[in-house]
Image (cartoon, rainbow, N blue to C red):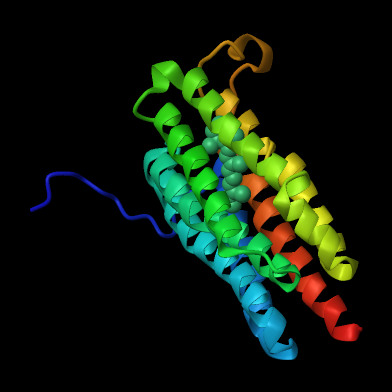
């Protein structure tokens, strides 16, 4: 006998008014379709680009599996699946850092760049998790520390060694790097907004309270699928010239 009650609800009780549940459901389908798209496109690319497109597919695939769990969790408990959310991010965000490294490898990117970005992203996520769960009454402080790590990532890709490598690579790689930089600056900035809507802090009087999940789900769709498509397009363009 287990000592907790769990009502599996794979079919779920998705009420027409449950717009949060709806975004989880659409998230499952979008991530799944994107994964199929990336995986099935693999054969058309040169060896050189295959790993990058494969990683795009892995990112959306890992997210798809987590979305199935999160949708179910939401349908069963009506609560934010914060734990699954952060497990998903802790796997997929470092993989997005790997993408930067993979496309900059043509210009001689070192593994140390990749590890530096992975480290920063893990700091960003672990501190964010602590602020949303264990230390909720100090959410603003943990969110701030997380935000510092986020800004270092932004700095690294926009102005640091990653940007210099992109400039050295030029052409399609530089163009793709630029777009990915915008994803990180604008697309990733949606997450702290969701965090502020779901926790209490100095910001609460300005942003109010709202659904963290809707914001995170929209951000995930934009960032994971959009990011993957930029890499896919880079592979496609590079094939042509
Ligand atoms: C696929 C998932 C992605 C790209 C997730 C990205 C998440 C972030 C950029 C989260 C950032 C946060 C802050 C900058 C401060 C508040 C806490 C976080 C973790 C929401």
The C terminus appears in which quarter of the rendering? bottom right
How many labels sit on residues? 0
Quadrant position of ligand 1: top right
Q: Position of residue 166 (x, y in %)?
A: 80, 60
Image check: 238 left or right of 113?
A: right
Front position in the image: 235 or 30:
235
Q: Is residue 89 above or below residue 32?
A: above
Image check: 213 left or right of 234?
A: left
Task: Give the farthest residue toward the left.
Answer: 1
| Residue shown at 68% from the left, 90% from the top | 43
Q: Position of residue 67 (x, y in %)?
A: 50, 56
Q: Position of residue 222 (x, y in %)?
A: 71, 52
Front position in the image: 107 or 235:
107
Q: Which quarter of the picture shows residue 82?
A: top left
| Residue shown at 59% from the left, 20% from the top | 209
Q: Which quarter of the picture shows residue 225?
A: bottom right
Residue 22 appears in the picture as rendered: no
| Residue shown at 78% from the left, 52% from the top | 163
Residue 199 appears in the picture as rendered: yes
């Amino acid at each position: 006998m287990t000592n907790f009650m769990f009502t599996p609800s794979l079919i779920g009780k998705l009420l027409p008014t449950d717009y949060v549940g709806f975004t989880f459901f659409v998230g499952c389908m979008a991530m799944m379709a994107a994964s199929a798209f990336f995986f099935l496109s693999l054969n058309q690319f040169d060896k050189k680009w295959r790993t990058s497109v494969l990683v795009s597919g892995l990112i959306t695939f890992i997210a798809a599996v987590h979305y199935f769990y999160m949708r179910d969790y939401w349908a069963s408990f009506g609560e934010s699946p914060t734990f699954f959310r952060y497990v998903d991010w802790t796997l997929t965000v470092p993989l997005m850092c790997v993408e930067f490294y993979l496309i900059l490898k043509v210009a001689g990117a070192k593994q140390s760049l990749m590890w530096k970005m992975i480290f920063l992203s893990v700091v960003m996520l672990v501190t964010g998790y602590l602020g949303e769960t264990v230390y909720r009454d100090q959410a603003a402080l943990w969110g701030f520390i997380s935000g510092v790590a986020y800004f270092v990532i932004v700095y690294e890709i926009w102005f640091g060694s990653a940007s210099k490598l992109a400039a050295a690579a030029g052409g399609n790689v530089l163009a793709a790097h630029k777009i990915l930089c915008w994803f990180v600056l604008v697309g990733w900035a949606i997450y702290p907004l969701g965090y502020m809507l779901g926790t209490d802090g100095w910001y609460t009087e300005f942003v109010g309270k709202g659904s963290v999940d809707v914001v995170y789900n929209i951000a995930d769709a934009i960032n994971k699928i959009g990011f993957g498509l930029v890499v896919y397009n880079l592979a496609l363009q590079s094939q042509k010239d």
